[in-house]
Amino acid sequence: MKYDVVVVGAGPAGSIASRYAALNGASVLLIEEHQSIGSPVGCTGLLSTRAVSECDLEPSDDFVLNNVKGAFIYSTDGTSLQIDGGHTKAYVVSRKIFDRKLAQTAVESGVDILLRTKAVGIENSSSIQKLHVLKEGVEQTIKAHVVIGADGIRSNISRMVGLGNVKKFISGIQVDGVYESRNSEFVELFPGSYAPGFFAWTVPLSENVSRIGLGTTEPDAVQYLNRLIKSNPEISERYQGSIMDFVVGAIPLGTLDKTFTDGVIVVGDAAGQVKPTSGGGIYPGAVCAKIAGEVAAKSALKADPSKNSLVEYEKRWKSNIEKELDTGMKIHEFITNLKDEQLNDLLHSMNNPKILDTITKYGDMDHPSILVKKMMHPSNSKPVLKICWSLAKTVI
């Protein structure tokens, strides 16, 4: 087999990259090691409206399970802060159906797909790449001008060509269970010691069913989830004990130093293109995947897959979102280093109409730096200003 571009990994980033390579005139093969697209799931399924739009999809009942317009943020002393966006800010989606929808759009654009096909080796060069795969247990070699690695946080492609893997990550774990939501249009967030290094959440699928989970940089995420369910007063009171689904995964923290080499581009979770503030990878992954597909096609069609040609990919994605990802990392590090008492004081200070209005107006899941700058207005309360100015020193 020979193609202009081969994409490894049929998650959102892989499907979008393959589609954009095809739209730019390349012959494209998309391979996936699992027997079906969208499984196993490793995500909360909470996507900003911008993320869905960036994937070139219209929200529809076939993959959207619920609309979300706000959040309740809980301090460890039980105080809650209500952030009401006023209208739909995010969708709770079925990732299985969402991922398959993206793969379908790739196929409709001319992409070939092979399932149960695992990349096990690659000979990359500035001319033709030889990708060695196991297809249903049988060894095969696929030739291409450019290979795009969209094979997740433990990317084989990235490792095999010497780009390495993301070194830091958050362990994520969640269950779907019967849970009485305060408001089915609001998620609940629990920063602090219940989930060291990140935060815990409930994401409503309906009034009576929610996804309950957390991310942590500490080992044994299961232990922290059990503690959250049993000892958090909000969750323990409203959780009914049933488990209908169980998901584990890893969220990369920080991007790779380099995301291209001769004949190879790395994109999405494999490149660490994930928002450190929320762990969301769909929006930044989609932005970068479009660039990856376009650059790969252009380089393949002129028969120049050298790193001198593919460097355009890294220049463009960094120009587009690197600053926001770097800012998000600084916000993440600042917030997760606050002690429970400091977080409690911050949330208490923010609980006034003026500040809540600012958050509603400028809060953005995909661009958190906008809100940080707006929160530094001199008219805000001293505790909020103190925190925001301390944060600003690390961000700006």
Image: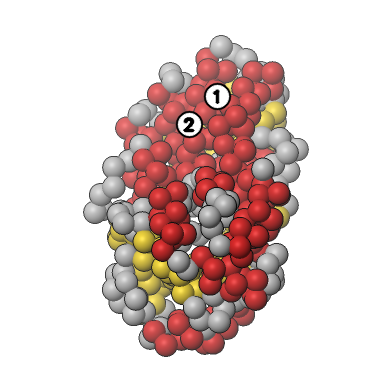
Please name whichever residue, 350 or 299, is drawn nearer the observer in this view of the structure.
Answer: 350
Instruction: Name, please, the residue furthest toward the front.
Output: 379
Q: What label sits on residue 360 in the rendered view? A: none
The residue labelled by disc 2 is 290
Residue furthest out toward the right: 162
Judge from the rendering whether residue 221 lies leftward or rightward of residue 112; answer left or right: right
Q: Nearer the viewer, residue 327 or 315?
A: 327
Where is residue 264? Give x, y as percent: 64, 30
Q: Residue at label 1?
A: 296
Residue 70 in view (yes/no): yes
Query: Residue type at mark 2?
Result: Lys
Q: Residue furthest left?
A: 61
Quarter holding residue 311: top right
Residue 89, image x, y percentages: 36, 53
Q: Is 68 above or below relative to 396?
A: below
The quarter of the picture where residue 144 lies is top right
Q: Is residue 167 left or right of residue 228?
A: right
